[in-house]
Structures are given as structure tokens and as C-alpha cells.
Amino acid sequence: EKKIKKAIKFFKSAISNYNSKNDSLAIVDLEQAIEVDVRFIEAYLLLANIYYDNRKFEKEIDAYKKVITINPDYSSKTYYLLAMALLSSGKYEEAKTNFKKFISYGNISDDVRKNIKAQIARCDFGTNGLKNPVPFNPVSLGENINSELDEYWPTLTADEMTLVFTREIP
């Protein structure tokens, strides 16, 4: 019982740090909570969420897999979240397996079922693309467009001489 209280203390501190946008301290707190109680599912779930926010999909995947190892039936949503992380990492077959596992729990709306079918189609498309690569020779446009920030919606002007895009600046 003393161990559980200590783990919960670390977890509450992690939530406070996470809500204050201090992810690095939240991660430290969660790792300490898990060190005290290796079966602390909620700590792994928050850890996965933080890794998702920071686009560290491999670590997110590991956290969700820990949850499933501890309790495969904790929540069907874990399979969906794991599948999305796997899809983002290009692990299409494994993502598809987890989408199907999520659906197997039933009790999902038609909209969610439609979304899952679309995600499975993305998995199939990715798998097919890896099996049947096409020649592609990308050329860097230099540091003016290839920054570490999110850049999207590229559009050429009518004369095709200028590329216009959006960059998300923190």
C-alpha cells in the first residue's frame, strides 16, 4: 500500500507538470511512478499521450504495448491508439492487426467503424506501396522550406514559378 501511494504521488505530479506543458518533468515523474509500480496502467497511458504530443511514435508504441501486456482487455481504445501510432510509424501490417482487434470488441458506432475501415485501407495502401516501390528522386528545396517546423499546404502559383506554403510557428 505504501508503494501504491508513492506511485500515485508521482502520477499526480506528472499530471500537474503535463497540464503546465512541462512534458520533460512529467516524463520523469511517470518513469518514477512506473519504477515503483510496474503495473501502473494509467502512468503508461499518460506517458503514451505525452510521446504522441511530441511525435515520438516509437516510445508511444512501447507505452501502449506495456498497457496491453499488463491487461489486454483494459480498454479497447488502447488498440486503436496503438494502431494509429503504428500507422504513423509506417508499421502498416501491425497497425492493421490492432485496428481489427479494436473492431473485434464491438459496440462501436457506424461512424467509428467507417473511420476504422478507412484506416485499414491506409494500411493496405502503405503495405502495397512498400511491396511495389516506384522510382522517385526527391530534390531538397533548401533550408527555406525544409525547417523543423510543420510546413503544409504547398501550392504553386499560376506561372509555376513560386511555391507558397504554410508554416506553423510556435
Image (spheres, rainbow, N blue to C red):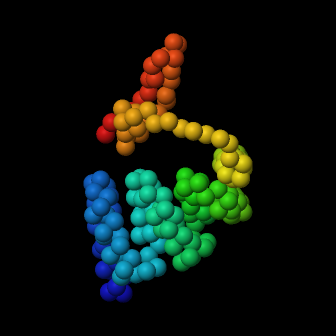
Say which quarter of the image contains residue 9: bottom left
x%, y% of residue 1? 36, 87
Residue at screen point 36% across, 82% down: 36
Q: How many marks?
A: 0
Q: Is residue 82 visible?
A: yes
**Depth order, front residue of 41/58:** 58
Image coordinates for residue 123, horizontal then vertical, percent? 67, 51
The residue lying furthest to the bottom in this view is 1
Residue positioned 51% across, 21% down in the render: 156
Is 64 rendered above or below residue 114?
A: below
Q: Is residue 108 left or right of residue 147?
A: right
Q: Position of residue 94 (x, y in %)?
A: 65, 62
Percent position (x, y) of residue 74? 57, 71
Residue placed furthest toward the top: 159
Q: Residue at (56%, 61%) from the top-left corner?
A: 82
In the picture, residue 10 is in which quadrant?
bottom left
- The residue nearer to you, when weighing 118 against 110, is 118
- Which of the two residues, 74 or 23, is positioned nearer the viewer here? 23
Judge whether residue 11 can be spotted in this image.
no
